[in-house]
Amino acid sequence: MKRAVYPGTFDPITLGHLDIIKRATTIFDEVIVAVAKRPSKSVLFSFAERLKIVERAVKNLKKVKIEGFSGLVVEFAKKKKASCIIRGLRLLSDFEYEFQMALTNRKIAPQIETIFLMAHQEYSYISSSLVKEAVFLGANLKELLPKPAWVALKRKINEGFSR
C-alpha cells in the first residue's frame, strides 16, 4: 500500500488544503492528514477543534484518514509506514523553506520521500493566516474555506474571540 502523510496546522483548513488532499488521493492508496498538536506558530483553534474541523471537511473523501501528531513529521511518517510526505507549494516564496525541510527530513529518514504539489492557481494566494485576519476584519471569504471551517471561524468571531 502506498501511504502518504500530509502534515499541517490546518488553522483552519482551506480549499487550498482540500485541493492538495484530493489530488494526493489520486497518487496514493491512503493519505493521512496529520494535524500538528503543538505547532510552532500560535493557533486560533485548539488541537481538538482543528481535528474536528478537518474530519468534517474531508468526511466524503475516500482514502483519507485524519490523525494528530506531535514531534517530527518524518518520525510520524515512519511510525505510520508512509513512504512519502506531501507538501503544498503556493508561491515561490514557499519553496526555500519547504526545500530545507525536505532535505532535513531526508537526512533523518532517507527512505521517506517528499513530494511537492503545486497549489491550483485559484488557491495559490490562500493561507489560513490571511483568511483569518481578513475575516476578523469583516471580510466575507467563505468561498475560500470548506463549510465546516467557515462555520467554526464565524463561531469564534461571534463568541467574541479577540486577537
Image: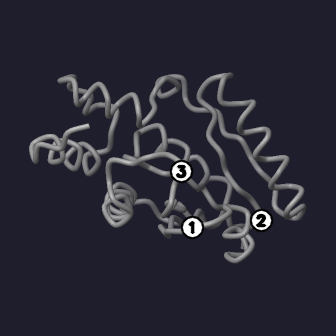
- Closer to the chain start, of discs 2 and 1, is 1
| Residue at left offset 57%, top offset 65% | 32
Where, quadrant-wise, is the N terminus in this rendering? Answer: bottom right
- Secondary structure beneath dot 3 equals helix
Q: How is the image coloured?
A: one colour
Residue at image mark 3: 21
Give the CA distance from mark 2 to mark 3: 16 Å
The nearer-to-camera label among 2 and 1 is: 1
Q: Please, which residue is most extreme toward the front here?
A: 163
Split into 4 quadrants, where in the image is the C terminus?
Answer: top left
Quick one: SS at disc 1? Answer: loop
Badge 2 amino acid: Ser
Q: Which residue is mark 1?
A: 70
Identity, as a three-letter code, of the amino acid under mark 3 = Ile
Vertical order, 110 against 42 (above or below): below
Element on which disc 2 rests: loop
Say whether disc 3 or disc 1 marks the residue closer to the N-terminus.
3
First in residue order: circle 2 vs circle 3 = 3
Q: Is residue 89 left or right of residue 82?
A: left
**Badge 1: few (under 14), some or many (20 or more) residues near its Cα, within 10 Å?**
few
- The residue pinned by badge 2 equals 83
